[in-house]
Amino acid sequence: MAKEEPTEKEQKRILVLCVDRDDDLEVKAGVKTPVIGREENLNAAVALALRDPEEPDANAMFEAVRLYDRLKSESDLEEVFEIATISGSELGGVGADRKIVAELNELLGFFPAGEVILVTDGYSDQAVLPLVESRVPVSSVSRIVVKHSESIEETAALFTRYLKMIMENPRYSRIALGLPGLLILILGVLSIFNLLYFYWIAFVFVLSAFMLVKGFGVDRIVKNIYQWVKEYTPPPLQVQISNFATVAGALCTVVGVYLGWTNAAAFIANITAPPDVAGWFSILPQIAAFFIKGSMDLIVGGICVTLSGRAIRWYLERDARLLRNAALIVSIAWSRWILDGTSDVLIRPEMGYEKLIFSIIVGILIGVASILVIFVIHRSAKGFFKETKEQVEEFGEG
């Protein structure tokens, strides 16, 4: 009885695959991949060899054709062979690997192989082999090394990779290219004007400035400030008003302290310096009085400006603390006359305390009147304010 030929489903599909990871086939010979079939691969290899006789990928393709012919002549009816070439990208890296995978998937859709015999130029098989094995089993790897040893080619590829990183990565190019380029530019400019004797001064200055910038992280600080300014979002209007009033009030207070110090220093300069510590203690009240006289207006004004900015913010936010803040502004504003009376008493006690006592009594009355007005306004305009339970209890306790 005659032996039955195996059907197509029982036949073992074997793919002889050549991989050109750096895409020399398309770049040098203009051949699009994937290339499928013996004649197509042979013509593509001849075209690449004519363009570059020393190209190892052309020799790898010739080896793939030779291997395909030998396997096909030795095989039986249970095995079906196909030969194909796929390529990556001249840029290498992730882009090349993704192109290889895409073309391999396209090839397997055309010829669903059960195993692959991989033919490479010897250098790229470490990168290509995992990509192919993740899609289809690899039964054999044939490495063709023609014009370079593998170690030399790997060294050249590694050197090229680091050179490309230095050229394209700003982190390294600023140091490896930017600094030497600046020094060479200075050398050229000074040579034009016959000032080469200044070059070493410029060299030391540029190098030391660069080291200081990198050492203290000035470039990172400037970058962070620029990023903050770029991403800065202004706060709401009421917060801006409050912050501006706070800064203005602080400046007024600082200037007031300076004027008070200047006034006290002028008083000390116009008197005879006491010979001992007891003499200084005797004139200390007068020094304090002149300091108060010179500083009270701006200090009180600065505090009132700060509280006024806060009051505007709370008014716009409809916060009930606005009322208490308004009473505080009135009380602090009146404290200016209390300070004035205090300084008069310290300078000339014989004038009496009537002015000081009057200022204190009026200040107390103003404080009580402010509290009463606050309660009346709070009751009549209760619906205007947005209060939380805690704010209501705090207001009641106040």
Image: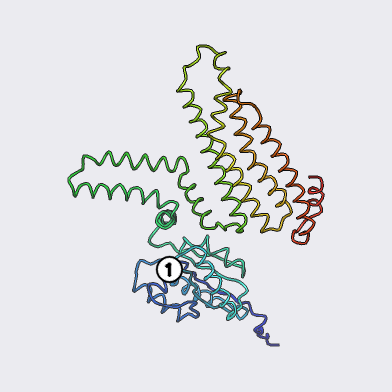
Q: Nearer the viewer, residue 9 or 207?
A: 207
SS under mark 1: helix
Q: Nearer the viewer, residue 141 or 204?
A: 204
Task: List x then y, in percent, for residue 202.
Answer: 29, 41
Q: Residue at x 48, y 78 (%)?
A: 35
In the visual, does 96 lie left or right of 330? left
Task: Say above or below: 153 vs 1.
Answer: above
Task: List x then y, in percent, for residue 131.
Answer: 57, 66
Density class for disc 1 (Cα within 10 Å; few <14, some 14-19, many ≥20) is many
Q: Residue at x 55, y 33 (%)?
A: 293
Task: List x then y, in percent, for residue 71.
Answer: 53, 74
Q: Residue at x 23, y 49 (%)?
A: 189
**What residue occupies the far top of the structure in this picture?**
276
| Residue 343 visible in rendering | yes
In the visual, does 7 lie left or right of 157? right
| Residue 157 visible in rendering | no
Task: Say above or below: 167 vs 33.
Answer: above
Q: Quadrant of the C terminus?
A: top right
In the visual, does 377 lie left or right of 116? right
Residue at which label 1 appears: 57
Residue 207 occupies quadrant: top left
Q: Nearer the viewer, residue 239 or 270?
A: 270
Q: Nearer the viewer, residue 227 or 354?
A: 354
- Kindly identify the amino acid type of the residue bearing the numbered disc 1: Asp
Residue 112 occupies quadrant: bottom right
Q: Residue at x 44, y 70 (%)?
A: 23
